[in-house]
């Protein structure tokens, strides 16, 4: 399975979502995208992004002000 990483720490909305959307195009179906962000709004943003795009939000965690999202590309 392909795995990509987007480091969006220090970026504010909508940049983490835009970078994730762009990189997700490079991930084959079934592959995963890991996103690291520091914007607290990204928690709601990525949950909504996955619902709207049909991708699976496998994991959403937070540690020391860094939010980590693991998204499975289903398209």
Image: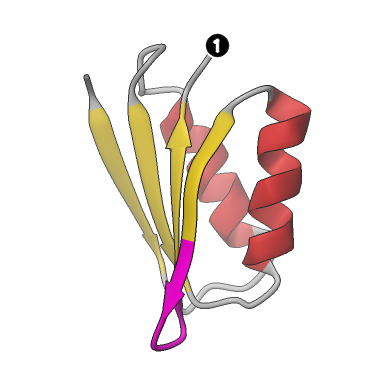
| Residue 47 located within the stretch drawn in magenta | no
Instruction: Compare residues 1 and 11 and report the one nearer the observer.
Output: 1
Residue at image point 53% right, 73% down: 11
Where's the N terminus, which quadrant?
top left
Quadrant for residue 3, please give it: top left
Image spot of residue 18 (x, y percent)? 60, 47
| Residue 66 located within the stretch drawn in magenta | yes
Image spot of residue 63 (x, y percent)? 39, 80
Quadrant for residue 33, please give it: top left
What scheme was used to colour the molecule? secondary structure
Q: In the picture shown, does residue 51 fall above or below 28? A: below
Q: In the picture shown, does residue 14 fall above or below 27? A: below
Residue at image point 59% right, 76% down: 39
Q: Secondary structure at mark 1?
A: loop
- The residue sitting at the bottom extreme is 64
Query: What residue sits right under mark 1 in the picture?
Result: 75
- The total of numbered circles placed on residues is 1
Residue at image point 36% right, 47% down: 34
**In the rendered structure, which segment of residues is drawn in magenta?**
61-67
**Crowd band around label 1 with a 10 angstrom C-alpha radius: few (<14), some (14–19), many (20+):** few
Q: In this image, 64 relative to 14: left or right?
A: left
Instruction: Compare residues 56 and 36 and report the one nearer the observer.
Output: 56
Where's the C terminus, which quadrant?
top right
Which secondary structure dominates the residues rendered in magenta? Answer: strand
Q: In the picture shown, does residue 66 fall above or below 5? A: below
Image spot of residue 17 (x, y percent)? 61, 50
Residue at image point 30% right, 47% down: 5
Q: In the picture shown, does residue 54 fall above or below 71? A: above
């Amino acid at each position: 399975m392909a795995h990509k990483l987007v480091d969006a720490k220090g970026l504010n909305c909508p940049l983490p979502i835009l970078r994730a959307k762009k990189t997700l195009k490079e991930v084959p179906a079934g592959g995963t995208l890991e996103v690291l962000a520091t914007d607290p709004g990204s928690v709601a943003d990525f949950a909504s992004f996955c619902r709207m795009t049909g991708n699976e939000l496998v994991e959403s965690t937070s540690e020391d002000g860094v939010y980590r999202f693991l998204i499975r590309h289903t398209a």
